[in-house]
Amino acid sequence: MVTGTAADAVDLLIVGGGINGAGIARDAAGRGLSVLLVEQDDLASHTSSASTKLIHGGLRYLEYGEFRLVREALIERERLLNMAPHIIWPLEFVLPQNQSPRPAWMVRLGLFLYDHLGGREKLPGTRTVDLAQSPVGAGLDPRAGKAFIYSDCWVEDSRLVVLNAIDAAARGAAIETRTRLVDAQRIDGGWKGTLKGPEGRREVHAKVLVNAAGPWVADVLGRVPDARTDRGVKLVKGSHIVVPKLYEGAHAFMLQNPDRRIVFAIPYEGEYTLVGTTDEVWSEKPGKAAISAGETAYLLETIGRYFDTKVAERDIRWTYAGIRPLYDDKSSNASAVTRDYVLDLDAGDNRAPMLSIFGGKITTYRKLAEHAMKELARFFPQASGAWTAGAVLPGGDMPDADFDRFLADLVTKRPALPPALLRRLARAYGTRTDRLLGAAQTVSDLGQNFGGDLYQAEVDYLVAHEWARSAEDILYRRSKLGLHTPAGTAEALDEYLAVSPPVPVAVAG
């Protein structure tokens, strides 16, 4: 079920509705365990929706000797591409060398390792181009010297979280948003947790507590009286800006700055370029992050250094920032802090197990979940084995993972609906698009138009099947329509949700 109430006793109580929590919930539910996931806000409302939207091995991590992490991520990259071809697709990156602080031989060696560490199958290998002669050089200033072109993948990050939650719910997990863990205590070899949600407070019991609270991982530990606290988390803020399109083409750029930090420029939502990210130590309590003046200036300077289109602060259309909960390896350089994950199991004789997740990245979330279940296997001898490696995510079950063929069939089946609308829906929902559209054949069948191409049918679907409860949930996490809709859309949407909220339904799949 998708929105049902959890039982009072479960095998796993998972705290945190980001990518790690949702991934673990899916894996555990698929092994036959009873699962309750609670998230204090919306799914993916913090770090997991504030990424650079990449499924990648992490080319720059090779510079810090993170070979195990890069290899695992590269293997997962193509695996995830097959699991969710509607929200993940290949993306070429141009790496100009004309302003590189690293010698060309070093970069080429890193790319050679990148091409071969993970057993690449679908994505093309690295090639070299002359920027003055190649179309990918258009828009750069100066347009000179050589560049390397390599491949990674794009991902709709917040949708990846939601798809994992949908699949977890279809396999029996209970997913409760706007629900906070107030405290947890070890009692009789298990856990008693106090939750506070829309319906008030209640108690639940669990055999295992999984702390996947991301930036709040230490905060959750603080709600457990006898928690072990010998692991640390370093919070690092990463910020992005969205500006009018800087160049033509479907390729992205990996830009090397004089301080050796990396900034990406990526085609975004058709009309824009996404630029980021920064690395800034976050010393405050976890919370909603915002880009700083210094970060804004840094990203604008990077644009000015590389592109012939000059951008000022007034040209920025949107910004977002997230706090990354990195495992504290005592590095003084925020960019060098490991992106690898650490699983800390606190258990013992008559001591109920608690598994805390430190660090991690979107690309390796599935493997992290698998490792988490391996850590917990001795507590659940009845559970089945690993299963997620080849299991597609909801909406990804299209023949041969061929999105273009799927879209062509969808357009043929519904010829009176705008092709651009069908393409957007297919990218977001994959094969579940038919469930959203129902019998609709024309836009008049889709109900109220809230602005742009957001119709009532989609809003009702998101509330009923994807835990959406507010305009922000819909416009900036389930989609990025907030960049395209006219003024007043958010207000009209919130009014609709408040006055005539669609009734959430419990459905499988």
Image (spheres, rainbow, N blue to C red):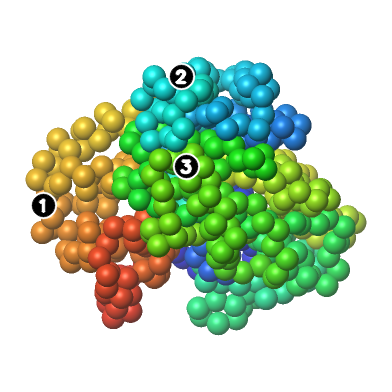
Q: Nearer the viewer, mark 3 or mark 1?
A: 3
Dividing the picture into quarters, in which one does residue 74 lie? top right
In the picture of the structure, the residue carrying the numbered disc 3 is: 265
- Element at badge 1? loop
Circle 2 residues within 10 Å: few <14, some 14–19, many ≥20: some
Taking the image as drawn, is residue 19 in sight?
no
Q: Earlier in the sequence, mark 3 or mark 2?
A: 2
Q: Where does residue 483 sit, x and y in percent of width and height?
A: 34, 58
Q: Residue at x 33, y 79 (%)?
A: 498
Q: Is 211 left or right of 464, judged from the image as shown? A: right
Q: Which callout, 2 or 1, points at the residue further toward the start of the chain?
A: 2
At x 76% / y 48%, what residue is drawn? Answer: 333
Asked if residue 316 is positioned above or below residue 122 in the image, the reply reads below
Q: Nearer the viewer, residue 416 or 232?
A: 232
Answer whether labels 3 and 2 touch (C-beta < 8 Å): no
**Which residue position is annotated with label 1?**
442
Numbered mark located on residue 49 in the image: none
Choose mark 2 or mark 1, whichever is in front: 2
- Residue tagged by mark 2? 130
Dot 3 amino acid type = Ala
Residue drawn where x is 49% and y is 39% of the image: 306
**Residue type at numbered disc 1:** Thr
Q: Cα distance, mark 2 to mark 1?
A: 48 Å
Q: Residues within 10 Å of mark 3 (few under 14, many from 20)?
A: many
Q: Residues within 10 Å of mark 1 (few under 14, many from 20)?
A: few
Query: Relative to 503, is 36 above or below?
Result: above
Count of marks, rendered view: 3
Identify the residue shown where x is 19% and y is 64%. Answer: 449
Q: Nearer the viewer, residue 469 or 276?
A: 276
Q: Nearer the viewer, residue 509 or 232?
A: 232
Task: Find numbered disc 3 in the image and state the secondary structure of the residue it sits on.
Answer: strand
